[in-house]
Image (spheres, helix red, strand yellow):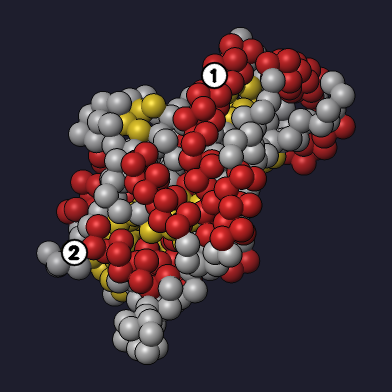
Amino acid sequence: MGKFISLSIPNFEGNERKYVDDAIDQGWVSTGGAYITKFEQELAKFLHVENVAACQSGTSALHLSLVEAGVRPGDVVLVPPLTFIAAVNPVKYQFATPVFVDCDDSFCMNPLKLKSFCEEECEWDGGVLKFNGAAVKALVVVHVFGNMADMEAIMEIAEKYNLKVIEDATEALGTKYTEGKYKNKNAGTIGHFGAFSFNGNKIITTGGGGAIIANDPKVTDHIRFLSTQAKTDPHYYIHDEIGYNYRMTNLQAALGVAQMEELPEFIRRKQKNYELYKKLFEDFEYGSLMPFRDGTDSNKWFYSINIDRSCISASMKDIIIALHKKKIETRAIWGLINEQKPYESAVTYKLEKAPYYANRILNIPSSTQITEDEIKYVADEVKHLLRSLANG
Ligand SMILES: *Cc1c(COP(=O)(O)O)cnc(C)c1O
């Protein structure tokens, strides 16, 4: 293999340059312009929702969702320990308190543990759920790697305890249920809020960017209002609320409109490449390719090898470095958020699966440009390396 095989790089095979040039030619490069509206409309159409607010990043999408959910200083928000830290940091921006609830085998929030946390650790007065005297206001569910959390179970618990559900559907753009109560519903359209990021490594990118959906289209309008400094009257500079500079720019949106044209093809390739990896890892002794949740049609954004730790004790770092020498970029799943410095003293609830997977999951190349030969090469080299490390 001559070429370095990247983990997850953007793909600009479509109209990206044409639309960005057009935005520049028109002089609309900032937070006004037709591409922003067009991008919002295309995303709304794709997700079968009425209203989408485009914003500056996934992080800002999550922050505005928490603001709109009414999360205030001192409130408790239930969060996942095994995901990208951007899903949790906005809880701190609101001076609220994150409590970490374990994941299940999809890496997403474990509904059984969520339920037992609410039942056994909290007090319920019929209106507000309280943990150590603080109101539990919301939970952030991340649909990890293209998976979908068990939303039916999670929504049932949230409805019972008046919790606002914020879905971080960044990694699951295009993933939907194929059966059950939420059949044909897309990730990000089931909870009270859905947040997306379009950073460079996501399935589509706007360079940097994000989007928010609220289950009430009027709330989405209000989020858009907050994202542009809450201009009650834009001509006379009247502001009745605290706003943010969180709006997507027209340049980003121009890129996004082109990417939306290609999204179905990107998903098709991700799904096809996953099937090939699956075949190649089928009978492998020292690791397996993680499946996606039954009853969903996943975008299969990111691929995870579950390394058999009963035979292989080598550190993730050594594995990643060895594969890098073979011109293959891999990465470890995230470090647990509750173990990061700012969260060391946070409350955790029955973390078992999260630390288990944190030490086992290796992500392998998943870019949409990857060729069949490259996939075969990656599988061969990963298997060869893990075999050589087994029982060593
Ligand atoms: C990338 C990512 C984010 C962060 O989005 P930004 O646009 O980088 O702020 C948040 N949540 C998840 C699950 C992500 O993968």
The disc at residue 383 is: none
Q: Is residue 66 visible?
A: no
Of callouts 2 and 1, the N-terminal one: 2
Q: Is residue 359 above or below residue 92?
A: above
- The amino acid at mark 2 is Trp
338 relative to 40 in the view: left or right: right
Q: Residues within 10 Å of mark 1 (few under 14, many from 20)?
A: some
- Indicate the secondary structure of the residue bearing disc 1: helix
> How far across and down, in percent of the image, does residue 249 sit?
53, 62
Quadrant hosting residue 223: bottom left
Look at 58% across and 40% down and name the residue there. Answer: 15
328 relative to 25 in the view: left or right: right
> How far across and down, in percent of the image, does residue 103 sit?
44, 43
> How far across and down, in percent of the image, does residue 125 sit?
14, 67
Q: Is residue 256 visible?
A: yes
Front residue (pair 335, 372): 372
Look at 22% across and 57% down and name the residue there. Answer: 216
**Residue picked out by circle 2:** 124
> CA–CA distance between discs 2 and 1?
47 Å
Going by the picture, which residue comes out furthest to the left? Answer: 126
133 relative to 334 in the view: left or right: left
Front residue (pair 378, 367): 367
Q: Residues within 10 Å of mark 2 (few under 14, many from 20)?
A: some
Look at 44% across and 66% down and name the residue there. Answer: 63
- Indicate the secondary structure of the residue bearing disc 2: strand
- The amino acid at mark 1 is Lys
Front residue (pair 370, 351): 370
What quarter of the picture does the C terminus occupy?
A: top right
**Residue picked out by circle 1:** 272
